Amino acid sequence: MMKLNLTVILSLLIATGLAQPQKKVEVLTLGSFHFAFHNLDLIKTTADDQIDVLDPKYQKEIEDIVARIAKFKPTVIAIEEDPEKQAKYDSLYNQYLQGHYNLKRGEEEQIGFRIAKMMNLKRLNCVNAWGTDYEALNKVLDGKDSMENKKFMNYFNQCADTLKRYFPKPIFKTKGIKAELIQKNDPKNINSDLGTYLIGIFKYETTDNKFFGPDFVTGWWFNRNLRIFRNIQKISTTPADRVLVIFGAGHMTLLNSFFDASPEYKLLKVNDYLQ
């Protein structure tokens, strides 16, 4: 049987279109602080340090931010809400389109709803997910071992590493929302933010498990973001689509890495649009 060399095989593949590189789906990720200040994250924002994004001066700034990001012309928008809330957000968005709903403070509405309307999109996709822990950790995390649970929570909230900041302090109150978003989406700051998950609770040990911290962070953060990424993958897209992802900036430490490494997506830089 005649053997075909590599050059001949490649030529045949190109001729049939099988070796043509597939166009990737373009993705733009916007890492944001939470406009509504629900304070559900480890680092809280005191009332004195918060802003009201519904104030006219901030509304004007948000309109400018929306106009800049809209130049990306997204055909799909993914937001940090659980898939179980999809019907709720479909309803709110439809009311907004009909002029019967005033936007609340959340960035998913202030930015997401506005851009979706500008792009004539029918919906925004709820893609949030929560991590799953190793079964061996549940006795402590669920509080069944109350003494160990208390010890763990005290360490989680009070250890020196946890309370340190390895990324710039917020500037939304002094320099504005756009400046804050540019700062949060700077690759150097995103990389530094990832480092905060490799200290603090990551170092926690129990008598029975010297790797309790890494195991916990695996479920709490890494597994969660992998699940979020998987939810985004589930959105039906074609190479012509452009996906805008609006999430808390902390998620960009992993989500951007996933998009950048993925053979399916091409990650663009949001600061190219904001600056």
Image (cartoon, rainbow, N blue to C red):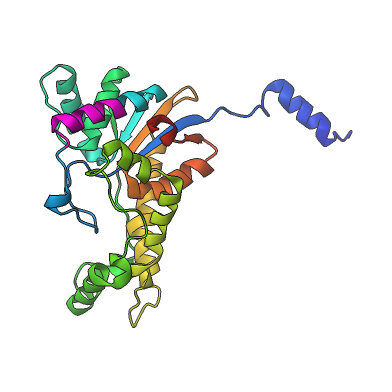
For the image, the number of numbered tags is: 0
Query: Residue reaching furthest front?
Result: 174
Residue occupying the point 30% across, 20% down: 121
**Residue 184: percent from left, percent from top:** 35, 45
Q: Which quadrant: the N terminus?
A: top right
Above/below status of 189 relative to 134: above
**Residue drawn at the location 16% of the way across and 22% of the way down:** 96
Q: Is residue 120 left or right of residue 98?
A: right
Q: In this view, does 224 lie above or below 231?
A: below
Does 191 appear above or below 174?
below
Task: Out of 10 and 92, give the one closest to the viewer.
Answer: 92
* Predominant SS of the magenta segment: helix
63 in magenta? yes
Q: Nearer the viewer, residue 100 or 182?
A: 182
Quadrant housing residue 147: bottom left
Closest to the observer: 185 or 154? Answer: 185
Q: What residue is at 37 percent from the left and 49 percent from the top?
A: 225
Query: Could you tell me if residue 236 is visible in this image?
Result: no
Please state which of residues 260 and 31 is positioned toward the viewer in this rendering: 31
Residue 148 x, y percent position in the rendering = 23, 77
For the magenta stretch, what is the residue range? 53-65
Which quarter of the figure is the C terminus placed in?
top left
Quarter holding residue 133: bottom left
Q: In the image, residue 56 lies at what x, y percent?
A: 14, 29
User: Is residue 61 at least partly visible in the picture?
Assistant: yes
212 displayed left or right of 151? right
